[in-house]
Image: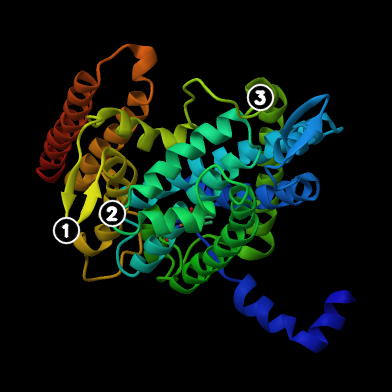
Amino acid sequence: MVFKWLDERLELREFKDHFLSKTFPAHPTFLLGEIALFSFITLVVTGVFLGFLYEPSSKMVALFGAMVPAAYASVVRIDLLPMGMIIRRIHHWSAMIMIAAILAHLMRVYFTASYRKPRELNWLVGLGLWTITMGGAFTGYLLPYSKFSVTATSIAYYIAKSVPWIGGWISRLLFAGTFPSDGTVPRFFFIHVMLIPIALIGLIGLHMLILVKQKHTEPISNKSKKEADGGRRLIGIPIWPEQAAISVSFYFFLLFVVVLIATYIPLNPIETYGPPSPGTPVMRPDWYFLIVYGFLKLIPGDLSFSILGGKITPETIGGVIFPTFTIAVLALIPFLDRVKEPQNYMANPLHRPFMTSFGVGGGIFLGMLVVAGYIDVLHIAPQRMLVYTIVASIGAWGISYALLRLYNKKRKGGG
Ligand code: HEM
């Protein structure tokens, strides 16, 4: 009845026949992109709840007889509300899960060569999504305005300031002046709740549109099925209602897992950290920022030089050059690993010794940087940790390359 009414006005049937009858190839690893997408939905819903109660200001107010920043006081009050603390934890856990899912999804696309022609553009859109999601996590850090928030954000402030030539301008734009100042919290709040969600919604939409237009890569097992089936374009599940039913059920399952984790595992307990105060102890950022944090730990503190009037400091190398270089290398991959014919099937990672071993070595390198974020508690000297990091990553690359070459030689030789 409602559908008929709407169809007469909006020609919904055309959309239903054209779009919803499309087929989606089934493979468990395709759920990784969905986990990222679903976590984003949970972030928006819980974020709207938090947005009604949060006060974006660092002005001092009274809370239980003590003077604390208004942002901090509002988050303490949220924690005291019925369901308040759990919703805040669900928000933070969803951010963690979204970033973990993005990384796993990126690895799936990389190892199966699904970035190859014609999907180069969607790979680049994906890299944009990853970068902006990290921006969302970073701006979210400051908002509770606890001791931890201020320490973590001040690291980023010095990184922003260290950009040669334009560092002062970037830091003023992002932090609304020097940090900490009264302008910073409202500026971060605006970026966190407006700019980043709008950019993510736009880019996720583009990512999905390109995906629908280009069609998904298929599991290689579909090839023989398709040949037997007269070469149909895609073998899989229709988007409506089968895939939709699976996705909605999967969303609720994911939500159940997140609620369970959030119930039992506290995150960012700001009451324990307390409001900002002088002499804050060393605090480690969340795991996904440990890559940059660990890299900064490995660079000698006195490594600075000038180039064309701009100063390069350890912060510039670890916080600006290294992340930019990593993203640039990833962006170039589809253009270096090119194929003439479109890549319609997921490649077998075992059949790609160079790219797979490069991915393994790169993954170990990033993993070692996370470990480097803990060198103070592990009591390892930075120079020694640097040697371990280089040896482990080059070793992993070399060993996996040699083994994969051997495997492929035997496979091709029919042995
Ligand atoms: C907010 C972050 C992201 C979301 C919500 C998202 C979502 C999705 C979804 C739902 C799919 C279809 C299912 C699947 O293949 O897993 C997909 C496919 C794809 N994504 Fe993402 N993605 C994100 C980030 C990324 C990143 C970081 C990359 C790589 C740099 C990437 C590259 C691709 C490519 C190339 C495809 C097509 C894969 C194929 O046809 O096999 N995405 N994405």
Disc 3 designates what residue?
Answer: 274
Amino acid type, mark 3? Gly
Q: Earlier in the sequence, mark 3 or mark 1?
A: 3
Residue 266, image x, y percentages: 66, 24
Amino acid type, mark 1? Leu
Q: Nearest the camera: 294 or 36?
A: 294
Image quadrant assignment for residue 297: top left
For residue 403, above or below residue 231: above
Amino acid type, mark 2? Pro
Q: Nearest the camera: 53 or 329?
A: 53
Which residue shows up at 66% across the image and 48% down it?
43
Disc 2 designates what residue?
Answer: 164
Q: Nearer the viewer, mark 3 or mark 1?
A: 1
For residue 159, above or below residue 209: above
* Image marks 2 and 1: residues in contact by CB distance under 8 Å: yes
Q: Earlier in the sequence, mark 2 or mark 1?
A: 2
Q: Is residue 218 visible?
A: no
Residue 308 disc label: 1
